[in-house]
Every structure is written in C-alpha cells, then in structure tokens.
Image: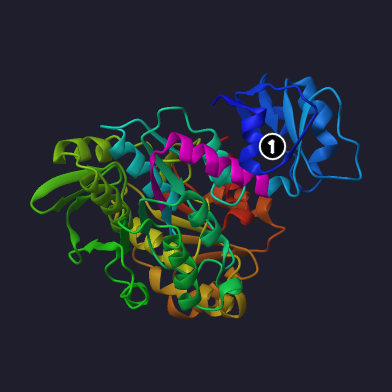
Amino acid sequence: MKLTTSIINKAVQGELLGTEEVTVTGVEFDSRKIKAGDLFVPLQGNADGHLFVQKAIENGAVATFWSNEAIQPPENIVVINVSDTLKAFQALASYYLLEENPDVIAITGSNGKTTTKDMTEAVLHQKFKTYKTQGNYNNDIGLPYTILHMPEGTEKLILEMGMDHAGEIRVLSELAEPDVAAITIIGEAHIENLGSRAGIADAKLEITNGLIDDGLLLIPADEPLLAERTEKLSQKQQTFGIQVGDISATIMSESREATLFTVDGKAYQIPMPGKYNVKNALIALAIGRWYGLSDEEIYQGLTYVEITKNRTQWLKAANGADILSDVYNANPTAMGLVLDTFAKLPTNGRRLAVLADMLELGPEAASLHRNMVDHLNDQEFAAVYLYGEQMKNLAEVIAVRYPRLAVQSFAANEKIAMIEAIKRELQPEDSIVLKGSNGMGLLEVIDALQA
C-alpha cells in the first residue's frame, strides 16, 4: 500500500489538519503493531484508542484519524479529522478495494466459514495471486483490516463474514461488493439474538446485499430455508451437497487423515475427516470452476490445503493419545456433525468426548443441549466429560438413555478438576474429541493434555 494523506483524506471525506503530506504504507488500529509509515486508526474498544496515539507515534505512525474533540490532537503527526474513526476505516478499505479491484469471494455460515475460506484460497492460489481473511478477522473491524492488508496485485480476495446480530453481514457485503458469495450451513449459532433458524437464514442472506448483479451465490442443497428465500434473486445460483445439488459429491472413503470423494466422476480428496468438510470443499470446487481452474488444479488445492488451527485438527496428547480439536466455536448442528464423524473413525483404543456449553442459544438452550444425546451412544463412546451449566441437561438424558456410558459433569469453575479427571482416564491408544463454544476455554484443556 502506498497512499498519500491527501488521497486518504479525500477517500474518507475528512478534514486534513496542516499542509504537510506524507505517504502511508500500512494501517493499524493497535498501537503496539504500528510500523514506520503506518496510519493509526484510534477505535473505541475497552478503552478509547485516541489515548494510545503517542505510543503509535513512538512506533513510527506518520498519520492518524481523529474524532475525539475532548482530546487535543497531537502536533507531531499528520491528523485527519473524521466524524467516526470506524466509518473512516471502512471507507478507506472500500477505496483501496476499488483501487486494487480484485475479484471478491465472500463466505458466511453458521459453521465451516474458516475451513471453507482456507479451501477456497488454496484452490484459487493454484492459478491466481490470492489473499484471505487472517484468523477470525471477519467483523466490521476485521474485514476492512483484511482489505487494507491485501498485497498490491491481489487477484482474488477471499473474505470471511461473521455476525451475531441482524444487519451486520449487510454492512460487510455492501462494503466488499462480492463477485461470489457462499453460505456454508444454517445452524443455531446466535439464535438467542436472531430468534429462530429462519432469522439466522435471513441474516446470512444479507451477504447478497452487496453481491454484484452477474455474481454467483452458492447455497446448500439440503436447506429449504435458503431455497425459499433465494427464488427471486437475480444472481446466478448453484447448490451443493452430498449426492444432491448442482455440485454433488459421493463419499468414497473416510479416515482420520483424509476423505476421498467424487464429483462428476472425478476424484478429489481433503486432508481431514467429515462429510461436512466435503460440503465445504464443494464450495471451493464450485468457485474454482467458476474461475476456470482445471480439475487437476482444484485437486491440488484441496489435497494440500492448510486449515486454520482448531478446526477439525488432529493433535497428540503428551501420553500419545490422539486429540481431535474442534474448539474454536460450537452450535448444535456443528457439534452433532463432529460427534457423528468422530464416532465412525477407526481407533486403536477407546473414544472419549469432552463437550462444553454452546453459548448464545437463548430460551431453547436446555433442549438443544439435551438433543446432543442423539449423537452419543455406549457402543462408540467409552466416556464423556461435560463442562458447563447447560451441559448438565445433557448429562441427565445420557443417564437415562445410556446408563452404562461413563459420564462426568463439571461446573464452569471446575476446569482444573475436569482436566485432572481426563488425564487419569486417557490412555495412550485412546482418541478424544473436544468441542464447545470458544468462550468456554477448551483450548486450555488441550494445552493441559499436551503439556
């Protein structure tokens, strides 16, 4: 990035203080990450970002947005007055996106966004210069940050779009104006805020608000909530699924390390288990085809994709046991899919599960947790560790349906006790899966098992 402060000022419709002009080579909202030549964006978070401008200057910032009238702007840096620093941040991202003009691929869904983003980037990278959302930078701050860190010459930009309230994806989609949009799945994540799965479907479909007129929308073939809501859209649509949809896969084999499947008679593979991950791969495959990649290029991208940590990731415990980590987040649909997959994978020992509360499920939380009993049994699981207040509901129904299944339930303040119980039971030949909402901190459990 190389933008002069006068160009930036025009892009954000600000007021440039002084006559000095400098060239900005990067943008940061965290003063600790500032490098020489950066623009500092003081956002309102737990603290007012304006309070950290001096630290940004010390680290090399050459310009800053400014909107706090109660604090005197610094004199030893170029200042651009704006009414709202976040909106200015987003406006600058929109300008830079127009300047670079890559094709934009937007991905949302209740589960699988990050994995699908990784797969799509891996496929498109076979032919194009690509850039993707880093980590989980998928909200109103993270998305413009991703755009502004896009290298010059990027041809395909893959953006993950997250939300927990209605209206949030609309803002992201209208900012990014995607050429291709994909919805992975409609689950129950954030149902507390959105009221129902129908409300979730409406919120996810906000991704079409900015979708260009001759763009492509990809939706799961087995989701009637989306089918009935997309009938009147003018953009081209394709559906995907397992033995159903415009892009249809047949599963050939599944192991811990890979899943082999075919589409239109052509074999593909992904380096992870799970039919749900094959569905994610179908999105990447469809996008690859849309942009003219060959079957072989798509095959290479899917086969060697590197998935972001803690999304269907195999790890080793200190004693040699196999850990399947899928702890970044959870909702009932996602947890059920992971448990169903794990139950069918071969193991030299026993299968154990650690399940933590799924957050933001609203009034139906208790019943949604109880329903997880449909994905457990005493033939394929030897022990289950339940963590959190809501998981006590699942413990009750397991005791009734599977009285022989060893179940231990722990309150939210008993994480250490749970770790100790797991360590006592876990044998070197065992396999253990962990799934729960990010806020429950299961990463600490994984770290303890590996220590």
Magenta region, mostly helix, strand or loop? helix
For the view shown, which residue lies furthest in the front direction? Answer: 19
Name the spot of residue 417 as percent of width and height, x first.
Answer: 67, 53
Q: Nearer the viewer, residue 73 or 124?
A: 73
Q: Nearer the viewer, residue 28 or 301?
A: 28
Q: Amino acid at mark 1?
A: Phe
The colour scheme used here is rainbow
State the residue at coordinates (22%, 35%): 300
Q: Which residue is mark 1?
A: 29
State the residue at coordinates (82%, 45%): 47
Q: Is residue 101 magenta?
A: yes
For the view shown, which residue lies furthest in the left direction? Answer: 265
Name the spot of residue 172 as percent of width and height, x first.
Answer: 53, 54
Quadrant that contains the N terminus: top right
Circle 1 SS class: loop
Q: Seen in the image, is 444 located left or right of residue 132? A: right
Label 1 neighbour load within 10 Å: few <14, some 14-19, many 20+:
many
State the residue at coordinates (82%, 34%): 52
Q: Seen in the image, is 41 located left or right of residue 187? A: right
Q: Is residue 430 visible?
A: no
Q: Is residue 321 magenta?
A: no
Q: How many marks?
A: 1
State the residue at coordinates (53%, 44%): 94
Quadrant that contains the C terminus: top right
Name the spot of residue 318 as percent of width and height, x first.
Answer: 51, 35
Name the spot of residue 246 as percent of width and height, x first.
Answer: 19, 62
Q: Is residue 192 above or below residue 128?
A: below
- Give, as a single range, the part of the protein colored magenta: 87-106
